């Protein structure tokens, strides 16, 4: 198994995705929120880049639920924002989310062309690593970053999972991510650029929730042909 990490989301254009399983990471907060919503009973989700695309889908299919943020705040007219705590502890009887965020949904779309696309976060790190081991394919981690730039928390998470894979070959990006994971304490991730933005909005509970490691058994998969994603049903 080969493992590589894209250190900045804008670098994805320089990578050949065919032949790789691409793992999208947006710790603060998209991939954490999607995992939590699906574990609470939402059936599936559809990531889109733009707010207008989400609203157009809602007009055509009123049963859809809209979720997402701009500048970390809920989009006006949407049913949900981008907080995992909106869904934690809930018990939904199904439901389909159309999701649009500043960073995470763009990263999912950027993964098109990979052999498979998995969404991961700190809460699902061990579960995703176990799933990837079972697949036995080369793995490319794609941190969503912050507005196209490197993000500490997403790359740290990639480094954690890269270590858990115990792969035979690590690229330079993967080695850098693993060193970051080794030398930066988990609690420091709350003080990343994105973490400070959430702090300024008073979203400390979101930060603490997102920084819990390997507490979930859920693995989120995205089907790039249909555009829909859901929990893996068989592990």
Image (cartoon, rainbow, N blue to C red):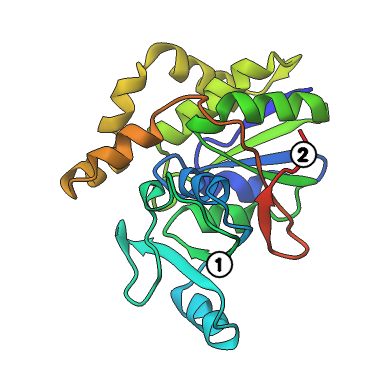
Q: How crowded is mark 2: few (under 14 residues within 10 Å), some or many (20 or more)?
A: many
* Residue 200 x, y percent position in the rendering: 16, 46
Nearest the camera: 32 or 156? 32
Q: Marks 1 and 2: in contact by CB < 8 Å?
A: no
- Residue 48 is tagged as 1
> Residue at horizontal 37%, vertical 17%?
184
Q: Which of these two is toward me, 172 or 160?
A: 160
> Could you tell me how far apart the alpha carbons at marks 2 and 1 are, in whole angstroms?
22 Å
In the foreground, 77 or 3: 77
Question: Nearer the viewer's eye, disc 2 or disc 1?
Answer: 1
* Element under disc 1: loop
Find residue 199 and report its horizontal and vertical position in percent. Answer: 20, 41
Q: Position of residue 201 (x, y in %)?
A: 19, 50
Residue 22 image offset from top left, x and y in percent: 69, 41
Question: 163 left or right of 86?
Answer: right
Above or below, comparing residue 57 to residue 180 in the picture: below
Q: Which mark is residue 20?
A: 2
Is residue 17 among what the camera can see?
Answer: no
**In terms of image quadrants, where is residue 95?**
bottom right
> Between residues 22 and 56, which one lies in front from this camera angle?
56
Q: In which quarter of the image is the N terminus?
A: top right
Question: Does dot 2 land on a helix, a strand or a loop?
Answer: loop
Residue 129 appears left or right of 114:
left
**Can the viewer see residue 233?**
yes
Residue 145 to residue 44: above or below? above
Q: For the point 53% across and 21% down, which residue is it?
A: 160
Q: Which residue is drawn at 40% across and 69% down?
A: 79
Image quarter in which the C terminus is found: top right
Mark 2 or 1, nearer chain start: 2
């Amino acid at each position: 198994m080969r493992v590589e990490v894209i250190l900045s989301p804008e670098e994805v254009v320089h990578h050949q995705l065919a032949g790789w399983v691409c793992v999208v990471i947006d710790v603060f907060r998209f991939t954490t929120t999607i995992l939590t919503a699906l574990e609470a009973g939402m059936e599936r989700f559809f990531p889109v880049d733009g707010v207008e695309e989400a609203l157009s889908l809602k007009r055509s299919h009123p049963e859809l639920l809209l979720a997402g943020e701009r500048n970390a705040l809920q989009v006006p007219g949407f049913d949900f924002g981008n907080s995992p705590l909106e869904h934690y502890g809930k018990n939904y009887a199904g439901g389909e989310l159309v999701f649009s965020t500043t960073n995470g949904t763009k990263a999912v779309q950027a993964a098109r062309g990979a052999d498979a696309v998995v969404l991961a976060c700190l809460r699902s790190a061990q579960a995703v690593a176990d799933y990837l081991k079972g697949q036995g394919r080369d793995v490319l981690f794609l941190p969503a970053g912050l507005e196209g730039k490197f993000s500490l928390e997403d790359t740290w998470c990639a480094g954690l999972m890269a270590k858990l894979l115990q792969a035979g070959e690590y690229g330079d990006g993967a080695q850098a991510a693993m060193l970051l994971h080794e030398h930066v304490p988990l609690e420091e991730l709350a003080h990343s650029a994105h973490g400070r933005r959430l702090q300024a909005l008073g979203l400390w509970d979101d930060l603490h929730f997102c920084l819990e490691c390997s507490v979930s058994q859920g693995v989120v998969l995205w089907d790039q042909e249909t555009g829909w994603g859901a929990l893996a049903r068989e592990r």
